[in-house]
Image (spheres, rainbow, N blue to C red):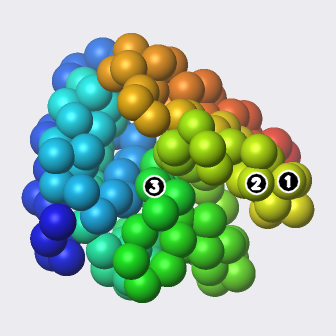
Amino acid sequence: MGNAPHSGSMPPPSSGRGQGTLLYAVDDEESNLDLMERALRSGYQVRTFGDPRRALAAAVKEPPSVVVADYRMPHFSGLALLRELRRQGLSYVPVLVCAPTDVEQIQKISRESATFRIITKPWIASDLRRQVDLAVSLHQLQAARSHR
């Protein structure tokens, strides 16, 4: 449960659709960050953060394409982090991770904040990866449309 950013980035492989795409994983539990980093590092640059405030500060300097955030964290929730990133004008695709008991509440709230995906705990690495791959594809489509 550290507050320091996790240095979980690895160089992307030489092939892959999301090659080099920057992802942020934000969770106050170190073990979850380690699992997320391992599930997502192939083909992506992954930055992990144990404190949402540090992720927010880093995003201003190095904007991510996708942010995977835990819903329940100290200081402010994953949903609050996603909202603040939007307020800062960042263009990214959000993915929120939560307990099954939080899904209904988050679905109501997320309609207003455009959460792309909600993933429930305990998640399976292949499911997380699939959802993030879809989020990366969506971000690429949005970027292509904005450059027309």
For the residue labelled by badge 2, is the local secondary structure a helix, a strand or a loop?
helix
Disc 3 versus disc 2: nearer the observer? 2
Q: Nearer the viewer, residue 16 or 111?
A: 111
Q: Is residue 49 visible?
A: no
The one of 22 and 30 positioned closer to us in this rendering: 30
Dot 3, crowdedness within 10 Å: few (<14), some or many (≥20)? Answer: many
* Residue identified by numbered label 3: 70
Classify the position of the N terminus by image quarter: bottom left
**Can you say whether 59 is above or below 133 in the image?**
below
Dot 2 and dot 1 residues touching (CB under 8 Å): yes
Q: Specify the quadrant of the image occupied by residue 51.
A: bottom left
In primary-sequence order, the first of circles 3 and 2 is: 3
Q: Is residue 131 left or right of residue 28?
A: right
Amino acid carrying mark 2 in the image: Gln
Q: Residue 54 at what x, y percent from top left?
A: 32, 79
On screen, 122 above or below 103? above
Q: Which mark is residue 105?
A: 2
Question: Does dot 1 land on a helix, a strand or a loop?
Answer: helix
Vertically, is 58 above or below 34? Answer: below
Q: Which residue is mark 1?
A: 108
The amino acid sitting under disc 1 is Lys
Residue 47 image-quadrant placement: bottom left
Give how far apart the Cα atoms at labels 1 and 3 are.
17 Å
Q: Along the horizontal axis of the image, is 145 left or right of 34?
A: right
